[in-house]
Image (cartoon, coloured by chain):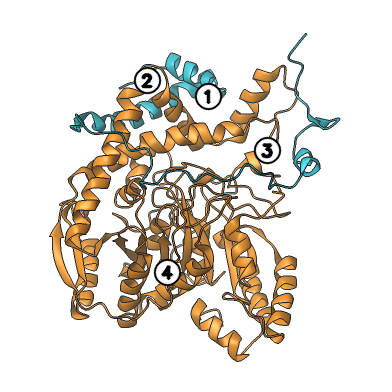
Amino acid sequence: MIDLTLTELKDALARGDFSARELTAAYLQRIREHNGTLNAYITVTEEQALAAADASDARRARGEAGLLEGLPVAHKDIFCTRDVRTSCGSLMLDTFNAPYDATVVARMADAGAIMLGKTNMDEFAMGSSNETSYYGPVRNPWDTARVPGGSSGGAAAAVAGRLAPAATGTDTGGSIRQPAALCGVTGLKPTYGRVSRWGMIAFASSLDQAGPMAHTAADCALLLQAMAGHDDKDSTCVNEPVTDYCAALSGDISGLTIGLPEEFFPDDLDGRIADATQAVVRVLEQRGARVAKVSLPSVALSVPAYYVIAPAEASSNLSRFDGVRYGHRCDDPADLMDLYKRSRSEGFGEEVKRRILVGTYALSHGYYDAYYLRAQKVRRLIRDDFKRAFEQCDVLLGPTSPELAFALGSKKDDPVTMYMADVFTIAVNLAGLPALSMPAGFIDGLPVGVQLIGNYFDEGRLLNVAHSYQQETEWHRQAPALGGTA
Amino acid sequence: MAIDQETVARVAHLARLHISEEDGAEMSSRLSDILAMVDQLQQADVADVAPLAHPLEVTQPLRKDEVTEPDIREQALKLAPAAEGGCFLVPRVIE
């Protein structure tokens, strides 16, 4: 059963092929066998999962099955879960048990989903390789000497390695899409404001968004259906009607115009990744899509703009971790200042400290106009580029990542090189647009991902384009040989 | 723009972080790398461009000023590293 997609598992549970308990037990067994190698989970909630599965089987027997009834899911350890540790990948929150569930967690549980555990991630979602986690790096199931991407690397590795059929992730600059690409799964970052962020630990509040990760676009449609919608507890969560995402999956893309931004195909792009991306375009053309060339000239400045805006917002958001109300506190503080400084310096890892310092610097007196204000102006230029592009086409397409999964440790001490891993994903967050990454083939045994970007609240169309592609291809069905020599 | 160790120490204080002298050199070199990359922003022609703080053109909704949250004072205090008498405990701040 672990090779079935979430949608297939839903049908199999409805038919009674197996129970939610049997399914949950099968995934818990996979976790026991392979989490030691992959380190995809920080916390496994075995007892709660089995109890929830029994309750789900009972609901189904009473004819009360919800949208995700009996389906196991893994939550990124950035979502607060009542009475289960929410660490955010940090020593700072190593002992933090939230007194409430995040809206995403509660909505999925209300729909019948079974939580298997909490997945590993870069500390406070700051990273593109999952190496900044206090709990150690996650390993890529396709080659355990390589990174899974980040920051939702545990989620991507769990789905790719069949340690969960689906997972939640969050995406501030590519943290769903880049690990999805590097691990060969499908991941969607919805429009900013589509999914509630209540109970999701904040990194950069004008960029953060939660979304689903699974094998297929149809699986992501099912998950987003349960996740999306207005929430009074999050004032940035928009009050727009939720599309019927599953009904949007006709597979018909005739007449669709796909824009290929020239900036996503730079001269120095790995030719193999460029070829894999063009191959996707040809499949979509055969299915009735038209192609247009477009340009997003200001996208070249998206990485520098992001590395002002995101650290600035992070430096403010992370000021709440003060060693007073919750989280890590140093031993024997001499005074209040010593308590703040040592608690924070011990509790945060190097990358988090770097970003807090960059953000504090960019917001400080004398530098605000040169950095923060200028970055916000560039942000408008980037947003306007996308607006113009969407006047000519329905979706944009390009590679998700400029590279395949890289070796563990190869960029760890070079933050600027690491930041370039998100060169194709970051502009989408600055503009607040929805985008997904889908598996598009393999190079030297490693997955390649292709990114589709949609207009605001056009998740249904994005999912349908990916679904159309997945009807024609089998990349999303490939499984790594865990425990083998691969 | 290069950021020297003295600036690192000043910014670290603003951010309530302690960066030891031995880590300061490494930190100043990494931060200088990041700021050098960020300095590409100076190439952009942003005359007459208004800053964009938020990706969606929406305004904050207002709600009625009503108490909706339950009282979780005890649970909240249980999360604290130190609490006493219904309050968070910190080192003495007034002599």
Task: Give the position of the N terminus of chain A as an image quadrant.
Answer: bottom right
**A309 vs A33: above or below:** above
What crowding class fits label 4: few (fewer than 14 Cα within 10 Å), some (14-19), or many (20 or more)?
A: some
Left/right placement of residue A5 relative to residue B31 reads right
- Residue A3, position as x, y percentages in the image: 51, 80
Q: Which residue is mark 2?
A: B3
State the CA–CA distance, disc 1 to disc 3: 17 Å
Q: Residue at x 37, y 60 (%)?
A: A457
Count residues near mark 3 (Cα–Cα under 10 Å), then give few for <14, some for 14-19, many for 20+: many
Q: Amino acid at mark 4?
A: Thr
Quadrant of the snapshot with the C terminus of chain A: bottom left
Do callouts 1 and 3 point to residues on the same chain? no
Asked if marks 3 and 4 fall on the same chain, the answer is: yes
User: Looking at the image, which is closer to me, A60 or B1?
Assistant: A60
Task: Give the amino acid type for the residue marked by disc 2 in the picture.
Answer: Ile
Q: Which mark is residue A243?
A: 4
| Quadrant of the image occupied by residue A304 | top left
| Chain in cyan in the render | B
Residue at left 28%, top 34%? Answer: A377
Residue at numbered disc 1: B15
Disc nearer the start of the sequence (2/1): 2
Mark 4 and mark 1 in contact? Answer it, CB < 8 Å. Answer: no
Q: Which residue is mark 3?
A: A327
x and y percent of residue B19 in the render?
A: 54, 23
Q: Which colour represents chain A?
A: orange
- Disc 4 and disc 2 on one polypeptide chain: no
Instruction: For the residues labelled 3 and 4, say whether their Cβ atoms are less than 8 Å apart.
Output: no
Mark 3 and mark 4: span between their CA atoms?
39 Å
Query: Residue under mark 4: which chain is it in?
Result: A
Q: Quadrant of residue A107?
A: bottom right
Q: Amino acid at mark 1?
A: Ala
